Amino acid sequence: MARYYGYSPKGTVKSAVESFESKTQVRSAGGTLLGTVYVDISDEEWAVAIAYGRAQHPKLRGPEPVYEVRYAHQTRDARETKRIDTRQEEPAIIEVEPFPSEDEFIVWALDEEKGRIHGIAV
């Protein structure tokens, strides 16, 4: 149930998003959380957000997600990406190499989030 704004996914990205949504689950005290991916691409910023909700993918209308994680990359500042997790107070700055395309950024953000969930560095 991914949502795309300012962008039409192609094969690799579409597969990566579908795989993330269907296979990635987060265990929490209240049960299993599932993530819905939102991709927002503009000239100034590329962003991938994941909204985690209980037992079903969060929707725009319906129960609020339990938490959200957002990766935002300013295209003019190609050396860092900001990760905002609504469970934490301060955003994290991640040093990165420049991304050659939006597709590379989206796949990177999903891999980074999978690594965080499973407690491994990507």
Image: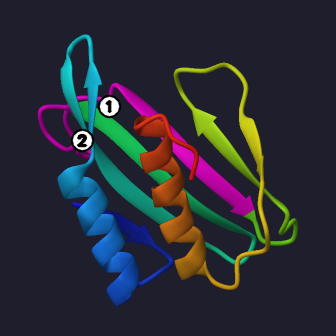
Mark 2 in CB contact with mark 1 (< 8 angstroms) = yes
In this rendering, does residue 9 appear at all? no
Q: Is residue 3 magenta?
A: no
Mark 2 nearby-residue class (10 Å; few <14, some 14–19, many ≥20): many
Mark 1 nearby-residue class (10 Å; few <14, some 14–19, many ≥20): many
The chosen color scheme is rainbow
Q: Is residue 85 left or right of residue 31?
A: right
Vertical placement of residue 72 versus 65, above or below: below
> Which secondary structure dominates the residues rendered in magenta?
loop
Magenta segment, which residues? 54-73
The residue singled out by tag 2 in the image is 58
Q: Position of residue 110 (x, y in %)?
A: 46, 58
The kind of residue tagged 2 is: Pro
Q: Quadrant of the N terminus?
A: bottom left
Residue 77's quadrant in the figure?
bottom right
Q: Is residue 3 left or right of residue 102?
A: left
Q: Is residue 82 left or right of residue 18?
A: right
Instruction: Identify which residue is drawn at 25% across, 64% down.
Output: 19
Among the two numbered marks 2 and 1 on one chain, the one whose residue lies closer to the N terminus: 2
Report the disc number at residue 65: 1
Camera-side residue of 121 and 87: 121
Q: Secondary structure at mark 1?
A: loop
Q: Secondary structure at mark 2?
A: loop
Instruction: Identify which residue is drawn at 26% across, 33% down.
Output: 53
Give the CA separation, mark 2 to mark 1.
Answer: 6 Å
